[in-house]
Image (cartoon, grey):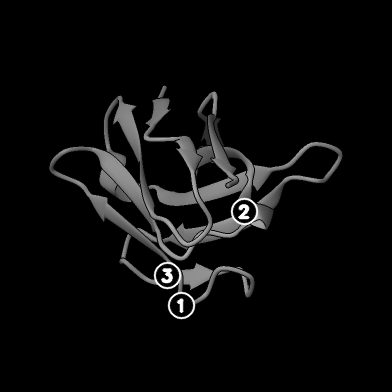
Amino acid sequence: QVQLVESGGGLVQPGGSLRLSCAASGSLFSTYTLAWYRQAPGKQRELVARITSGDSTNYADSVKGRFTISRDNAKATMYLQMNSLKPEDTAVYLCNAARTGWFGKQEYWGQGTQVTVSS
């Protein structure tokens, strides 16, 4: 069982920056693929960025060049550095941990942290 807790959200002006954190409890953190998703009011949840256990990353086109995902396995924490924020980045940001093996698929979600980009 893995528990995920996000932090770092808040209100920021357009062009500003925020750094989100997702702290995990439980074992074998390094074996999970981690991801940030976001969900804006009235919209579907969308993948923002993903980082594998081997540190390969991929990003949604809308955030490429502005957001950076990273992980610190020793601290069991994932990060999302968000720069040049735009009003359309406003959403609840959720972290996700998933892995697949002989046991099937295991997937966990955090509760989310609100990011609001507004002047």
In the picture shown, does residue 4 fall above or below 49?
Answer: above
Secondary element at image label 1: loop
- In space, the residues marked 1 and 2 are separated at their CA atoms by 14 Å
Q: Nearer the viewer, residue 43 or 50?
A: 43
Q: Measured from the top left, where is residue 16 in percent x and y? A: 42, 56
Residue lying farthest to the left in this orientation = 74
Counting residues from the N terminus, which is met first, the one under dot 3 or under dot 2? Answer: 3
**Which residue matches tag 2?**
89
Q: Residue 111, image x and y in percent?
A: 54, 23
Question: Would you name the residue on which mark 3 appears?
Answer: 57
Is residue 97 visible to the viewer in this orientation of the structure?
no
**Which of the labelled discs sits on residue 65, or is there none?**
1
- Place of residue 57 in the rendered image (x, y in percent of width and height, measured from the top left): 42, 70
Could you tell me which secondary element the residue under label 2 belongs to?
A: helix
Of callouts 1 and 3, the N-terminal one: 3
| Quadrant where the image shows the N terminus | top left
Q: How dense is the environment of label 2, judged by Cα within 10 Å: few (below 14), some, or many (20 and up)?
A: many
Give the class, few, some or many, for how many residues have Cα within 10 Å of label 3's Cα (few <14, many ≥20).
Answer: some
Quadrant position of residue 47: bottom right
